[in-house]
Image (tube, rainbow, N blue to C red):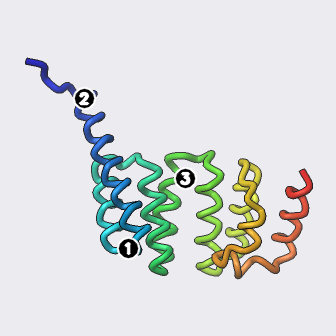
Protein backbone atom coordinates (compact mmCIF):
# COMPACT_ATOMS: atom_id res chain seq x y z
CA UNK A 1 0.00 0.00 0.00
CA UNK A 2 1.30 3.45 -0.91
CA UNK A 3 1.62 6.07 1.77
CA UNK A 4 1.10 9.72 1.20
CA UNK A 5 4.35 11.48 1.78
CA UNK A 6 4.74 15.17 2.54
CA UNK A 7 4.66 16.09 -1.14
CA UNK A 8 1.36 14.29 -1.70
CA UNK A 9 -0.19 15.87 1.38
CA UNK A 10 0.89 19.30 0.16
CA UNK A 11 -0.57 18.57 -3.28
CA UNK A 12 -3.83 17.39 -1.70
CA UNK A 13 -4.04 20.54 0.39
CA UNK A 14 -3.43 22.68 -2.68
CA UNK A 15 -6.12 20.85 -4.64
CA UNK A 16 -8.60 21.24 -1.77
CA UNK A 17 -7.63 24.90 -1.46
CA UNK A 18 -8.29 25.40 -5.18
CA UNK A 19 -11.70 23.76 -4.77
CA UNK A 20 -12.64 26.18 -1.96
CA UNK A 21 -11.31 29.07 -4.03
CA UNK A 22 -13.47 28.01 -7.00
CA UNK A 23 -16.55 27.67 -4.78
CA UNK A 24 -15.83 31.10 -3.35
CA UNK A 25 -15.76 32.58 -6.84
CA UNK A 26 -19.10 30.94 -7.70
CA UNK A 27 -20.68 32.22 -4.48
CA UNK A 28 -19.32 35.74 -5.01
CA UNK A 29 -20.67 35.75 -8.57
CA UNK A 30 -24.11 34.94 -7.14
CA UNK A 31 -23.78 37.79 -4.66
CA UNK A 32 -23.43 35.51 -1.62
CA UNK A 33 -20.47 37.41 -0.27
CA UNK A 34 -20.43 36.14 3.32
CA UNK A 35 -20.41 32.55 2.09
CA UNK A 36 -17.70 33.41 -0.43
CA UNK A 37 -15.56 34.87 2.35
CA UNK A 38 -15.83 31.61 4.28
CA UNK A 39 -14.70 29.62 1.23
CA UNK A 40 -11.74 31.90 0.53
CA UNK A 41 -10.68 31.71 4.18
CA UNK A 42 -10.82 27.90 3.99
CA UNK A 43 -8.71 28.03 0.84
CA UNK A 44 -6.14 30.21 2.62
CA UNK A 45 -6.16 27.97 5.68
CA UNK A 46 -5.27 25.02 3.46
CA UNK A 47 -2.77 26.93 1.35
CA UNK A 48 -1.61 30.20 2.95
CA UNK A 49 0.56 30.88 -0.10
CA UNK A 50 -2.36 31.00 -2.54
CA UNK A 51 -2.09 34.53 -3.91
CA UNK A 52 -5.32 34.00 -5.86
CA UNK A 53 -7.28 33.13 -2.72
CA UNK A 54 -5.91 36.21 -0.92
CA UNK A 55 -6.71 38.39 -3.93
CA UNK A 56 -10.23 36.97 -4.23
CA UNK A 57 -10.88 37.42 -0.51
CA UNK A 58 -9.69 41.02 -0.78
CA UNK A 59 -12.01 41.67 -3.71
CA UNK A 60 -15.02 40.40 -1.76
CA UNK A 61 -13.98 42.45 1.28
CA UNK A 62 -13.82 45.47 -0.98
CA UNK A 63 -17.29 44.74 -2.37
CA UNK A 64 -18.54 44.67 1.23
CA UNK A 65 -16.78 48.01 1.79
CA UNK A 66 -14.35 46.42 4.27
CA UNK A 67 -11.48 48.36 2.77
CA UNK A 68 -8.90 47.86 5.52
CA UNK A 69 -9.40 44.09 5.43
CA UNK A 70 -9.16 44.20 1.64
CA UNK A 71 -5.92 46.18 1.83
CA UNK A 72 -4.37 43.59 4.15
CA UNK A 73 -5.26 40.72 1.79
CA UNK A 74 -4.05 42.57 -1.32
CA UNK A 75 -0.73 43.24 0.42
CA UNK A 76 -0.43 39.54 1.25
CA UNK A 77 -1.21 38.60 -2.36
CA UNK A 78 1.53 40.97 -3.51
CA UNK A 79 4.03 39.48 -1.08
CA UNK A 80 3.31 36.14 -2.73
CA UNK A 81 3.32 37.45 -6.32
CA UNK A 82 5.26 40.73 -6.30
CA UNK A 83 5.26 41.13 -10.09
CA UNK A 84 1.49 40.81 -10.53
CA UNK A 85 0.16 43.82 -12.43
CA UNK A 86 -3.42 42.99 -11.47
CA UNK A 87 -2.57 42.71 -7.77
CA UNK A 88 -0.88 46.13 -7.94
CA UNK A 89 -3.93 47.56 -9.69
CA UNK A 90 -6.26 46.13 -7.02
CA UNK A 91 -4.01 47.47 -4.27
CA UNK A 92 -4.10 50.90 -5.91
CA UNK A 93 -7.89 50.75 -5.82
CA UNK A 94 -7.77 49.93 -2.10
CA UNK A 95 -5.52 52.89 -1.40
CA UNK A 96 -7.83 55.13 -3.41
CA UNK A 97 -10.89 53.88 -1.50
CA UNK A 98 -9.05 54.58 1.76
CA UNK A 99 -8.33 58.10 0.46
CA UNK A 100 -4.57 57.62 0.25
CA UNK A 101 -3.95 59.25 -3.15
CA UNK A 102 -0.14 59.23 -3.07
CA UNK A 103 0.01 55.50 -2.37
CA UNK A 104 -2.81 54.84 -4.85
CA UNK A 105 -1.05 56.65 -7.68
CA UNK A 106 2.36 55.17 -6.89
CA UNK A 107 0.87 51.67 -6.90
CA UNK A 108 -1.20 52.36 -10.01
CA UNK A 109 1.96 53.45 -11.81
CA UNK A 110 3.65 50.22 -10.75
CA UNK A 111 0.69 48.22 -12.09
CA UNK A 112 1.05 49.92 -15.46
CA UNK A 113 4.83 49.46 -15.45
CA UNK A 114 4.24 45.74 -14.87
CA UNK A 115 1.89 45.53 -17.83
CA UNK A 116 -1.62 46.51 -16.72
CA UNK A 117 -3.18 47.94 -19.87
CA UNK A 118 -6.96 48.15 -19.45
CA UNK A 119 -6.94 51.94 -19.62
CA UNK A 120 -10.62 52.18 -20.55
CA UNK A 121 -11.57 50.29 -17.38
CA UNK A 122 -9.11 52.37 -15.38
CA UNK A 123 -10.86 55.54 -16.57
CA UNK A 124 -14.27 54.17 -15.50
CA UNK A 125 -13.40 52.24 -12.34
CA UNK A 126 -15.37 53.82 -9.47
CA UNK A 127 -12.76 52.57 -7.01
CA UNK A 128 -10.32 55.10 -8.49
CA UNK A 129 -12.74 58.03 -8.26
CA UNK A 130 -10.67 59.80 -5.58
CA UNK A 131 -7.60 59.96 -7.87
CA UNK A 132 -9.23 60.16 -11.29
CA UNK A 133 -8.86 63.95 -11.62
CA UNK A 134 -5.43 64.11 -10.05
CA UNK A 135 -2.98 65.48 -12.65
CA UNK A 136 -0.62 62.58 -11.91
CA UNK A 137 -3.33 60.12 -12.91
CA UNK A 138 -3.98 61.90 -16.19
CA UNK A 139 -0.22 62.07 -16.84
CA UNK A 140 0.11 58.33 -16.23
CA UNK A 141 -2.63 57.58 -18.75
CA UNK A 142 -1.17 59.96 -21.36
CA UNK A 143 2.29 58.49 -20.86
CA UNK A 144 1.31 54.84 -21.29
CA UNK A 145 -1.71 54.93 -23.59
CA UNK A 146 0.46 56.25 -26.41
CA UNK A 147 2.82 53.25 -26.22
Distance of mark 1 from mark 3, alpha carbons? 23 Å
List x then y, in percent, for residue 124: 72, 74
Q: Which mark is residue 78?
A: 3
List x then y, in percent, for residue 97: 60, 78
- Quick check: 5 left or right of 99? left
Q: Residue furthest top?
A: 1
Q: Is disc 3 placed on a helix, strand or loop?
A: helix
**Of 145 and 133, which appears nearest the observer?**
145
Q: Which dot, 1 or 3, sits closer to the camera?
A: 1
* The N terminus lies in quadrant: top left
Q: Is disc 1 placed on a helix, strand or loop?
A: helix
Q: Which dot, 1 or 2, sits closer to the camera?
A: 1
Q: Residue furthest left?
A: 1
Residue at position x 48%, y 56% from top? 76
Picture layout, residue 137 above or below residue 65? above
Q: Is disc 2 placed on a helix, strand or loop?
A: helix
Image marks 1 and 3: residues in contact by CB distance under 8 Å: no
- Quick check: 34 left or right of 97? left
- Quick check: 9 left or right of 77? left
Distance of mark 3 from mark 2, alpha carbons? 27 Å
Picture layout, residue 139 above or below residue 20? below
**Of 65 and 18, which appears nearest the observer?**
18
Q: Which mark is residue 8?
A: 2
Q: Residues within 10 Å of mark 3 (few under 14, many from 20)?
A: many
Residue at position x 27%, y 41% from top? 13
N-terminal-most mark, 3 or 2: 2
Q: Residues within 10 Å of mark 2 (few under 14, many from 20)?
A: few
Q: Which dot, 3 or 2, sits closer to the camera?
A: 2
N-terminal-most mark, 1 or 2: 2
List x then y, in percent, for residue 137: 81, 70
Q: Which residue is mark 1?
A: 33
Residue at position x 40%, y 46% from top? 49
Amino acid sequence: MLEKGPMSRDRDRTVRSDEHNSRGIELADRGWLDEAIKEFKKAIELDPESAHAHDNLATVYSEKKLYREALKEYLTALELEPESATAHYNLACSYALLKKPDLALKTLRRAVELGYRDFRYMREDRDLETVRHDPRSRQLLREYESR
